[in-house]
Image (spheres, grey):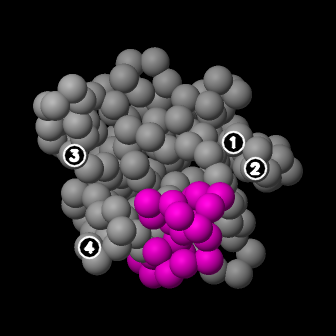
Amino acid sequence: MPKRALIIIDVQNDYFPGGKWPLVDMESAATKAAKLMERARSTGDLVIHVRHEFPSADAPFFTPGSEGAKLHATVREVEGEPVVLKHHVNSFRETDLKSILDQHGIEELVICGAMSHMCVDAGVRAASDLGYKCIVVHDASATRDQQFEGKVVPADEVHAAFMAALEFGYARLLSTEEYLAAEANK
């Protein structure tokens, strides 16, 4: 069985109600991410937290050192779990994520978090390109409404489009329930 890591991307305070950039159904996604985290910890899988900070104090959200940039309490790390700080959309760009995975001999990644159409998408594509087998837990990920040429694209449609693209060429897509059931049957 390949060595596996759970990567929780950007489940940070600013994405929750009251934060600077709230996402649709972020609370539900975070609760599901916490279930994945609990399972990973119980089976000895590596849990990696990715946290984004913009490089300047005038950022729209995830301002360096702010409360909003901290990991949400639902998925906070425990001692010994790596927290990767990133300043770009792609979790691998200018971070030590790949070296952490390599140090632990990781071959398979279970990925969830935020935003579906940005950091989750970029991280999964990069991981796949680097040769990792990827599973995306789609309901443990969230996004928000987007706009393009004056048209509002609802969050659920943004999420569905990006999950469909990832499933087509980069990852296996499962719900939290499907993933946990498959794990229980191993």
Q: Is residue 50 magenta?
A: yes
Q: Which residue is mark 1?
A: 92
Q: Residues within 10 Å of mark 1 (few under 14, many from 20)?
A: many
Q: Which residue is mark 3?
A: 145
Label 1 and label 3: CA atoms lie apart by 26 Å
Q: Amino acid at mark 2?
A: Thr
Q: Residues within 10 Å of mark 3 (few under 14, many from 20)?
A: some
Q: What range is drawn magenta here?
A: 49-75
In the rendered image, the vertical position of residue 33 relative to residue 139, given as above or below: below
Disc with the residue nearer the chain's start (2 vs 4): 4
Q: Which residue is mark 4?
A: 17
Q: Amino acid at mark 4?
A: Pro
Disc with the residue nearer the chain's start (1 vs 3): 1
Q: Position of residue 171 (x, y in %)?
A: 47, 29
Q: Amino acid at mark 1?
A: Phe
Q: Are marks 1 and 2 in contact (CB under 8 Å)?
A: yes
Image-based side of 42 in relation to 107, left or right? left
Label 2 and label 3: CA atoms lie apart by 28 Å
